Amino acid sequence: MIIITLPTRPPPKSVMRTLPTTTATVAEDTDPPHPPRRRVDRHGITALAALLAVMLVASVFIAIGLGSAVVPPTDTARYLWAAVTGGTIGPDEVTRYQIIWQIRTPRVLLAAVVGAGLSAVGAAVQALVRNSLADPYILGVSAGASVGAVTVSLFGALSVLGIYAVSVGAFIGAVIATGLVYLMAHGRGGVSPLRLVLTGVALSFGFQALMSVMIYFTPTNEATGTVLFWTMGSFGAATWGTLPVAAAFVAIGIVVLRGYGRALDVMSLGDETAASLGIDSMRTRRLLFVVTALMTGAMVAVSGTIGFVGLVVPHITRMIVGAGHARLLVVAPLGGAILMVWVDLLARTMVAPRELQLGVLTALIGVPVFVYLMRRNGYVFGGR
């Protein structure tokens, strides 16, 4: 038998040239759920963090000097230097010195601390509950803090603490709300992200209803002012006594969250994936849930509820540095701190001598930005 083998000819060059084009076209039409993102290397992250740190220091210095009474930069620097080093100032400068050091400096620094903390907690909570709409207040912490603050204002509880009674009451209310959310969300299989979110939302409505009932039966101007403060947010009550406590909670919390950056990366992909990589999702979620709740409670206790910062800043940061939490938890707190310093400056200068509530400005900024992110072609977080 004679076998004749016919030579195989390569496909025409025209066909070969069209194949890659066809493949690329199909890939574009299918719109993959995880589009490629430009990654910033380690040196780029360091440079970006250094740049943001410089911008933060400059923003803080500018915000301290500006207000209803503008203090020149040279005088601002001189007053700050005198306060830090124990220097002297002239008798005619005492009023401006007190404005700079006793009123504006703790307020601006508290704004930076709260902005950094909200951004870090927002990034962590979005990974913990695997929900791109999550923010620091989604688990009912702010509503519980509001009930605690109103309780102290109406019934005089914790009066022995003086000016810190309302803040301590708000923190206790936040901790109690956190415990209730966790206990009610705990099931046979542990605490699932969906149960956490649903329980937190339900209890938030319950706490708000309780607060409304308390105010209804005890209608006073003080109660109304307290509710307005806790629902819209303000740094008007900032003092050198409250600043170190809030700063300690936020700083320690950010360090802990960044230490669990790899765990957050894996948990954002699902508990099954985390288990396959050796991460105990239940234990890690429980620990980080406590950390984020304590951070949020400490911030709400000194500033009230400030919306959209913990929701929008993490998303914007992911667009720049990617979704890795080791990077995200370095850049997002700096960006949030800068944003909050400038928002607070606008709040106290736009209609001076009156002051706008922070929640109004953050909503006016956050809503358009978030709508843009949702409609932006190619930005995907948490699915289509």
Image (spheres, helix red, strand yellow):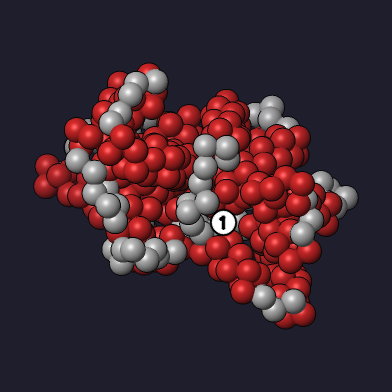
Residue at 38 percent of width and 27 percent of height: 83
Look at 69% across and 58% down and name the residue there: 149
Picture coordinates of residue 195 (x, y %)?
74, 57
In the drawing, does residue 277 fall left or right of residue 5? right
Query: Front-most of 354 and 1?
Result: 354
In-front residue for pair 240/51: 240
The residue shown at (11%, 47%) is 14
Q: Is residue 15 left or right of residue 157?
A: left
Residue 298 in the image: above or below residue 252: below
Q: Residue furthest front?
A: 91
Which residue sits furthest right? 188
Residue 380 position, x and y percent, is 41, 53
Q: Callout 1: 10 Å neighbours few (<14), some, many (20+)? A: many
Res. 240 in view: yes
At a point 43% along the width and 31% down the height, the residue shown is 330
On the image, numbered disc 1 is attached to which residue?
304
Q: Position of residue 182 (x, y in %)?
A: 78, 50
Q: Is residue 26 above or below residue 57?
A: below
Quadrant location of the N terminus in the rendered image = top left
Residue 372 relative to residue 213: left or right? left
Q: Is residue 140 above or below residue 37?
A: below
Q: Residue 323, can we see it? A: no
Amino acid carrying mark 1 in the image:
Gly
Image position of 291 with respect to 256: above or below: below
Nearer to us in this view, 235 or 157: 157
